[in-house]
Amino acid sequence: MDERPKSSSVPLILLAVLLLLIPLAAVLLLAPMVPCPYCHGVGLLEAPPLKDRWIREADLVPRVCDCCGDRLKIGRFREWRFRAPNPDRPIFVKGTEAGFLATRKFRIHWLAVATLEGVTGTPPVGVSKSTEHVPLLTGALQDEDREIRTEAATTLSRMNRKENLPLLVAESKRPSCDVPEILVSGIQGLARHPDLRRAAVEGLKEICEPSSSAPPDSRFFAAAALLELKEPCNSDYFIEHLKSWSEGSKIACRGVALCDRKDALLILIKEMARRPPEYMGSYAEALSSLTGEKFGNDPTAWYRWFEKNKDRFPPQIE
């Protein structure tokens, strides 16, 4: 009977187990990596603390993903080890800030409602008492979304507070301002108050100054506001906007007529000829006001008449 020790078979068993474990370990280590289920493989952005200021997309800060450690991918077999974080502040996946936009829109709407409580009508009647919201609204004027900028400007303009006058002037002069019509309407509205008229008019003239940093649209709307207030203004801004295809062209036509710019007759005729029939009315009204003639929306008739009578008028601006 063979009584040799069986211990010699142990290394063989261990070797066999090892040979089985090596491929398994290789499979686990070389398992395909998949996008992180929390940051979607692109990373995260976190909203900083509000601290009574307006937070824009540009203010979002990178956040380390608790799920993948910012590696953006995780092993398919290790996915179960991680849990999604529970953040204290709002977190957004990079490139999908739509959720943050919805948050900002809700916030600006709430601010507008809270700020304008007790203010009604157009032009506004009543005075806002919520001055604590002014810094937030001012910050929202530089938001990336135009709808938010517009609502912030409208709210500030409708507050009907004299303390807002320097702010409205300063924001209208900001080179990147793209809601000047709304801000200027706030200044013009404050001019209704006898004790504020002088300051409001001075603010509008300040915006119109050639040396001002205000964008062209701010100067144009400020000049239009001065015209409505029957104050002297630089009518050259109306000439510049006669070629505009925006609603500003109607204001420009009226401004040219009220300022008696007979040197703009040829521009009015040429611009009328470029417009569809439904947009010719403003030019026809300006021409009639400046000349006393009535050729309606017929640029050909206006041009023929002008060619026969141009010697009666000053040199025309081309």
Image (tube, rainbow, N blue to C red):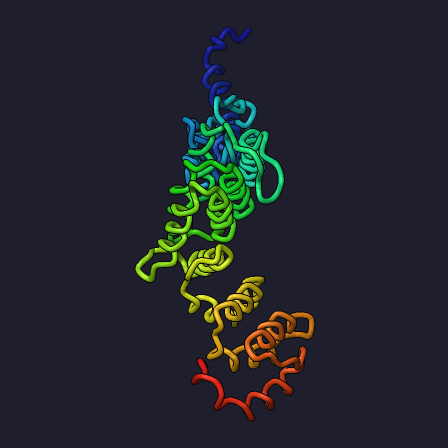
Asked if residue 199 is positioned above or below residue 12 in the image, the reply reads below
Image quadrant containing the N terminus? top right
In this view, the residue farthest toward the left is 211
| Image point (56%, 93%), residue name | 308
Where residue 132 appears, x then y in whole percent? 45, 27
Residue 299 lies in what quarter of the image?
bottom right
Q: Nearer the viewer, residue 169 or 20?
A: 169
Q: How many marks?
A: 0
**Res. 181 visible in picture:** yes
Q: Is residue 88 above or below residue 105?
A: above
Give the quarter of the image for residue 70.
Answer: top left
Give the vertical position of 213 relative to 298 (above or below).
above
**Residue 240 location, x and y as percent?**
46, 70
Nearer-the-camera pick, 50 or 292 = 292
Q: Quadrant of residue 307?
A: bottom right
Residue 207 horizontal/vertical position (percent):
38, 54
Is 102 in front, or is 193?
Answer: 193
Judged from this view, the residue extending furthest toward the front is 194
Q: State the residue at coordinates (40%, 65%).
A: 234
> Residue 217: where, in percent of width, then height?
46, 59
Residue at image x 58%, y 34%? 119
Residue at image position (46%, 79%) is 263
Location of the C terminus by quadrant is bottom left
- For the question of whether residue 27 can be seen, the reply is no
